[in-house]
Image (spheres, rainbow, N blue to C red):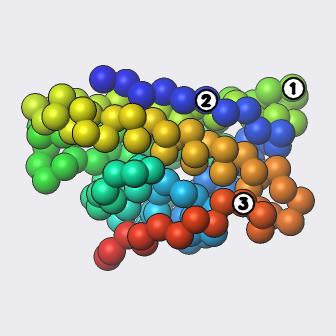
């Protein structure tokens, strides 16, 4: 199963990348994800995913691709491989000579628990993607580095 969302941001891919990979500041603007760790291939992250109206899920994905200002991917599993696996990705595409960026925010999901998990949190997860996209756009486009972005509190990942 594939969940794909898009947002266009009036800023360069470099600027979007800087905000997207500054995990330490996610709590200031990101209503959907809390992430601890480094955007380095092979690194293990601590992620708390908080879909609107659904329980927070914590997991430890592995960063599988880092192409600065272009693409970030990580692969996570619910408990163990094959039950519920998700490859989360952000793909940045320059527009208008690098003055704007199209962001594809997506996840490919699989596993034996996918139908059950999706039934309970699928709609909320899609709303979470959209809320994060809007918050990212606001954060990146603001002139004061996003201080006016969405600051809805959410759980931080546990280490």
Judge whether 146 appears above or below 6 on screen.
below
Q: Which residue bears the numbered disc 1?
A: 96
User: Which of pointers 3 and 2 indicates the residue nearer the eye?
Assistant: 3
Q: Residue at x 31, y 56 (%)?
A: 55
Q: Which residue bears the numbered disc 3?
A: 149
Mark 3, secondary structure of its residue: loop
- Where is residue 123? Give x, y as percent: 39, 34
The earlier-in-sequence mark between 3 and 2 is 2
The earlier-in-sequence mark between 1 and 3 is 1
Q: Quadrant of the N terminus?
A: top left
Q: Which mark is residue 6?
A: 2
The answer to whether residue 97 is left or right of residue 55 is right
Q: Quadrant of residue 122?
A: top left
Q: Residue at x 11, y 49 (%)?
A: 80
The answer to whether residue 46 is left or right of residue 129 is left
- Where is residue 21? Give x, y as percent: 58, 57
In the rendered structure, are the residues bearing label 3 and label 2 in contact, judged by CB atoms less than 8 Å apart? no
User: Which of pointers 1 and 3 indicates the residue nearer the eye?
Assistant: 3
Judge whether 113 appears above or below 45 on screen.
above
């Amino acid at each position: 199963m594939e969940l794909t969302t898009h947002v266009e941001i009036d800023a360069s891919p470099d600027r979007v990348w800087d905000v997207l990979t500054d995990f330490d500041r996610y709590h200031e603007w990101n209503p959907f994800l809390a992430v601890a760790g480094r955007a380095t291939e092979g690194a293990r992250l601590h992620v708390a995913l908080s879909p609107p109206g659904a329980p927070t899920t914590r997991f430890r994905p592995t960063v599988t691709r880092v192409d600065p200002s272009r693409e970030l991917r990580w692969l996570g599993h619910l408990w163990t491989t094959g039950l519920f696996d998700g490859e989360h990705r952000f793909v940045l595409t320059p527009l208008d000579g690098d003055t704007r960026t199209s962001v594809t925010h997506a996840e490919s999901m699989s596993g034996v628990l996918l139908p059950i998990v999706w039934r309970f949190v699928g709609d909320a997860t899609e709303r979470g993607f959209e809320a994060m996209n809007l918050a990212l756009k606001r954060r990146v486009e603001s002139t004061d580095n996003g201080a006016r972005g969405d600051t809805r509190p959410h759980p931080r990942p546990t280490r």
